[in-house]
Image: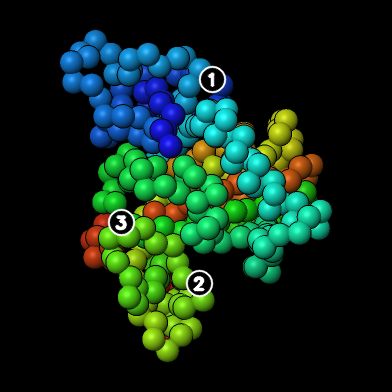
Amino acid sequence: MKLFQSRDVKKKSEKQFMPNQLDQPIGVVGPKFAPGVRPQIKHIKTSTNLRGHPPEVCQWWEYTMPFRHFGATNVFDEATYKELCHQFSLILDVTNGEREGEYKLTKVNKNYDALMLGLNDTLATAFAPIFTEEWLRSLAQFMNLEFLPRIEGALHSSPPNSNTGWIHTDLCSAWFDEKGTDKEKLMLPSRGRCNYFTGRANKPDAEPAEYVRAATMIFYLCNDDWKPGDGGETGLYGAHRETKYTDKKLVTPINNSLLLFECSPHSYHRFITNPKKTRNSIILWLHSKVENAEARWGNGINRRQHRQ
């Protein structure tokens, strides 16, 4: 599927994410490539915009507070977004007992109210183009990360009045069973063969290989008519706990928008309670080699617990 073209990346440092408020362009951040953007056409010298792109297409911004992150609105064209919502809604219907189906969301963490469903190859295909190699490579290039074909993804749905989550980072070990696999092939965790977080083998012949989460993307969908006061934002923080002095920003769960940031010891975030409406999202994690992550972050990587 052809990815939707976007405009230049722009920079902001406001405390609140305002998806409809434009900023002055400062040029493309990092490599001149982003999800849905083709490499710059060399003979265009007067503009960093691609030819023929309409003003209503995807908008990208870079933000600097409370840590470096990116936001985008109108990420996909209307037809693609509707299909993503359709697939997500089918699973919500099964979850709510409104239809029969193989997949449903469940509560998997007693300390976190969100209902979740980890993706497998079948679900990843259903939620294209997010989990296609073209999209994933675009994200990695945009973030100046080496692309590794090891990804994790999940569907999240937080019922109304879900508790605010804990402040945390996503910088942690991630384990994939590579028994008999092609290391160049795109792979999601084989959940039945080894524990994604600890590397504990669930099968005698499993060959867990360690990677480290490198980037987090949260795509918001099926949150119709969201308005201030509905909650469900993603809170970003400048420290591991919130005080009156802590830099803080709330990212609103506007349909067809996303939040993207590098996993680091400083990328503190959490879910904010939603008193009025269910908050829905698709989560994607890119990964890096252990040696690259250790060279960048040292002992800041959360190993969770030793492999058993």
Q: Earlier in the sequence, mark 3 or mark 1?
A: 1
Q: Nearer the viewer, mark 1 or mark 2?
A: 2
Residue 161 percent across, percent down from the top left: 78, 51
Q: Residue furthest top?
A: 46
Question: Is residue 92 among what the camera can see?
Answer: yes
Q: Residue furthest bottom?
A: 204
Q: Which mark is residue 148?
A: 3
Of 19 and 136, nearer the camera is 136
Q: Amino acid at mark 3?
A: Leu
Residue 35 percent across, percent down from the top left: 39, 36
Q: Earlier in the sequence, mark 3 or mark 2?
A: 3
Q: What residue is shown at x 18% (from left), y 20% (from top)?
A: 42
85 displayed left or right of 38: right
Indicate the quadrant containing the C terminus: top left, top right, bottom left or bottom right: bottom left
Q: Which residue, given by chain and number where applicable, does mark 2 sit on?
A: 191
Callout 3 secondary element: loop
Q: Please tell me in which quadrant of the rendered image residue 230 appears.
A: top right
Q: Earlier in the sequence, mark 1 or mark 2?
A: 1
Callout 1 secondary element: loop
Q: 10 Å neighbourhood of mark 2: few (<14), some, or many (≥20)?
A: some
289 displayed left or right of 64: left
Real-space CA distance between mark 1 and mark 2, rounded to the nearest whole angstrom: 41 Å
Q: Amino acid at mark 2?
A: Arg
Q: 10 Å neighbourhood of mark 1: few (<14), some, or many (≥20)?
A: few
Q: Amino acid at mark 1?
A: Gln
Callout 2 secondary element: loop
Real-space CA distance between mark 3 and mark 1, rounded to the nearest whole angstrom: 34 Å
Residue 242 percent across, percent down from the top left: 57, 50
Q: 10 Å neighbourhood of mark 3: few (<14), some, or many (≥20)?
A: many
Indicate the quadrant containing the N terminus: top left, top right, bottom left or bottom right: top left
Q: What residue is shown at x 23% (from left), y 21% (from top)?
A: 41
Q: Which residue, given by chain and number where applicable, does mark 1 sit on?
A: 21
